[in-house]
Amino acid sequence: MSKLSNYLEEAFLNHLLNNDPVSALATVYIALYTDDPTDADVGTEVSGGDYARVAVNANGGADPTWELAAVDGAGYSVANADDITFPTATAAWGEVTHVGIRDAAVDGNLLWHGALDESKTVGTGDTMVIAAGNIKLKLE
């Protein structure tokens, strides 16, 4: 997963080149999609059946966390340090094909997005888990 959203590209460039302040995010939220959210944030996020985004914390604590950025080939990357476990589905969520990283538990802005290595159909009673290291963000 290595695509920046239009929102984050604009915020990064304005911060870097126009001194536009950007606040650090102590927590981001992993979202599941049944299609590609695209850079423009127009995908279909899973809904219903007790679905909720999962918090991933930059500062440790009870939530899953991120590894520190490290050299990865021609750039740097960071990955989830812990498993990311979604609530047990109380109704079918459908075929999950993509994940996104958002800046809020509800609504908010898409920051990064990408396709899963393999899509997963989540039915009633299933629990979706993204294993540690399987969400990898890379900048080159």
Image: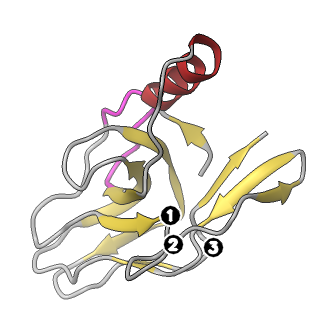
Residue type marked 3: Gly
**Residues at discs 2 and 1 in contact (Cβ within 8 Å):** yes
Q: Is residue 121 left or right of residue 9?
A: left
Query: Which mark, by number, is residue 58?
Result: 1
Give the camera-side residue of 18 and 109: 18
Rendered image quadrant of residue 117:
bottom right
Looking at the picture, does residue 81 appear above or below residue 48? Answer: below
Nearest to N terminus: mark 3 or mark 2: 2
Locate residue 28, reporting x and y percent: 40, 56
The label nearer to you, 3 versus 1, is 1
Locate residue 44, reporting x and y percent: 26, 45
Locate residue 74, reporting x and y percent: 89, 45
Badge 1: few (under 14), some or many (20 or more) residues near its Cα, within 10 Å? some
Separation of residues labelled 2 and 1 (CA atoms): 6 Å
Nearest to N terminus: mark 3 or mark 1: 1
Q: Is residue 113 left or right of residue 109?
A: right
Q: Residue furthest top?
A: 18
Give the camera-side residue of 40 and 20: 20
Looking at the picture, does residue 130 appear above or below residue 93? Answer: below
Nearest to N terminus: mark 2 or mark 1: 1
- Mark 3: secondary structure: loop
Q: Residue at x 79, y 60 (%)?
A: 70
Query: Which residue, given by chain and number where applicable, does mark 3 sit on?
Result: 133
